[in-house]
Image (cartoon, helix red, strand yellow):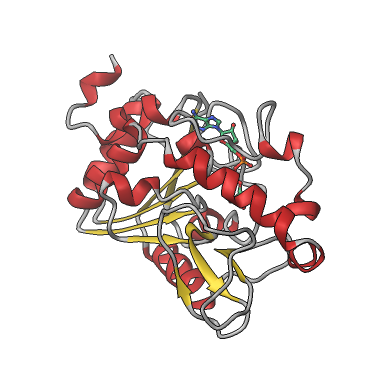
């Protein structure tokens, strides 16, 4: 565990993080693939990460889709199938509890798996879209559900190809979603960052903006990241273990 300049020296980091979260009125949580790892959803980077086995430029760019929509859709269909069998874990549930408790709250997730919503999070933005939505490349219609596709690549009623409603490399995040996340981060007293490598921008800039604006930023990750040195507190641990403790009512859980 790492301590930061502004932390109270008399408190263990977990206790201080829990106390900061309890006292704050305006809280933002930023999550990444690590939060779903313990539900069985693969992360992108790291030894078991998807980008070890697959190349993003073949599967997660507009060019890849233009070149081979069937290949891209087969990959997304495989991921949908895999995630369909996964359930929210204790980290998702802790963040849903924080959503209910904090007077002003926003969860900004980079995850496209829908597990936060399944766990009960409501005040939430999906920065990178959703595996469960499709968008028509012709008429722009957005829809979708969790059922498997009748054909791959799937088509819209208008006849044009559907694409996953996710943000690919080289694409911009929807402006209104990004603005909501940054506005909340700049206003927040506490920002909790869990399970992200903090390598992918603009999402990685959300806690940076919060730090600039004076927020207390708590990172939870078993590994150090580029955010670790800048965060007010960086807690080394798994999200499903640490987040329930941070959101739990008593600081004694850390003893
Ligand atoms: N609890 C908390 N963190 C964990 C856990 C866990 N149980 N297991 C792994 N992690 C951490 C890893 O140490 C790593 O820092 O989760 C992070 C996962 O990093 P990435 O795989 O890079 O995922 P993420 O940060 O969400 O990636 C951002 O990159 O490829 C794109 O669009 C994709 O949204 C994704 C974006």
- Image coordinates for residue 165, horizontal then vertical, percent: 54, 66
Look at the image and tell me whether residue 220 can be seen: no
- Image coordinates for residue 144, horizontal then vertical, percent: 44, 65
Q: Is residue 80 above or below residue 206?
A: above
State which quarter of the image contains the C terminus: top left
Q: Is residue 205 above or below residue 91?
A: below
Residue drawn at point x = 19 percent, y = 51 percent? 100
In the image, is 128 to the left or to the right of 59?
left
Look at the image and tell me whether residue 103 can be seen: yes
Please state which of residues 219 and 88 is positioned toward the viewer in this rendering: 88
Please state which of residues 26 and 173 is positioned toward the viewer in this rendering: 173
Which of the 4 image quadrants contains residue 89? Answer: top left
Q: Give the residue furthest to the top.
A: 255
Residue drawn at point x = 46 percent, y = 37 percent? 36
- Image coordinates for residue 24, horizontal then vertical, percent: 26, 50
Q: How many labels does the image show?
A: 0
In the image, is 97 to the left or to the right of 181?
left
Which of the 4 image quadrants contains residue 173? Answer: bottom right
The picture quadrant for ligand 1 comes to top right
Residue drawn at point x = 26 percent, y = 36 percent? 247
- Image coordinates for residue 57, horizontal then vertical, percent: 80, 54
Q: In this view, does 39 lie above or below 147?
A: above
Please state which of residues 115 and 73 is positioned toward the viewer in this rendering: 73
Residue drawn at point x = 57 percent, y = 57 percent? 203
């Amino acid at each position: 565990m790492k301590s930061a300049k502004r932390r109270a020296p008399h408190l263990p980091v977990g206790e201080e993080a829990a106390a900061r979260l309890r006292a704050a009125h305006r809280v933002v949580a930023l999550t990444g693939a690590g939060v779903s790892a313990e539900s069985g959803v693969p992360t992108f980077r790291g030894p078991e990460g998807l980008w070890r086995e697959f190349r993003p430029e073949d599967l997660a760019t507009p060019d890849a889709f233009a070149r081979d929509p069937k290949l891209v859709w087969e990959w997304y269909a495989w991921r949908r199938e895999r995630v369909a069998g996964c359930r929210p874990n204790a980290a998702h549930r802790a963040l849903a509890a924080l959503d209910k408790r904090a007077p002003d709250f926003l969860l900004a997730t980079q995850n496209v798996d829908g597990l936060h919503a399944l766990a009960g999070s409501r005040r939430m933005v999906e920065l990178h879209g959703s595996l469960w939505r499709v968008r028509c490349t012709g008429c722009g219609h957005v829809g979708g559900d969790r059922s498997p596709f009748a054909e791959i690549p799937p088509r819209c009623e208008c006849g044009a190809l559907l694409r996953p409603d996710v943000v690919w490399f080289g694409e911009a995040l929807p402006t209104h979603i990004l603005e909501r996340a940054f506005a909340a981060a700049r206003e927040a007293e506490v920002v909790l960052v869990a399970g992200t490598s903090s390598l992918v921008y603009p999402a990685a800039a959300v806690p940076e903006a919060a730090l600039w604006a004076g927020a207390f930023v708590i990172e939870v990750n078993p590994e150090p990241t580029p955010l670790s040195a800048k965060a007010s507190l960086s807690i080394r641990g798994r999200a499903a273990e640490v987040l329930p403790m941070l959101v739990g009512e008593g600081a004694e859980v850390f003893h």
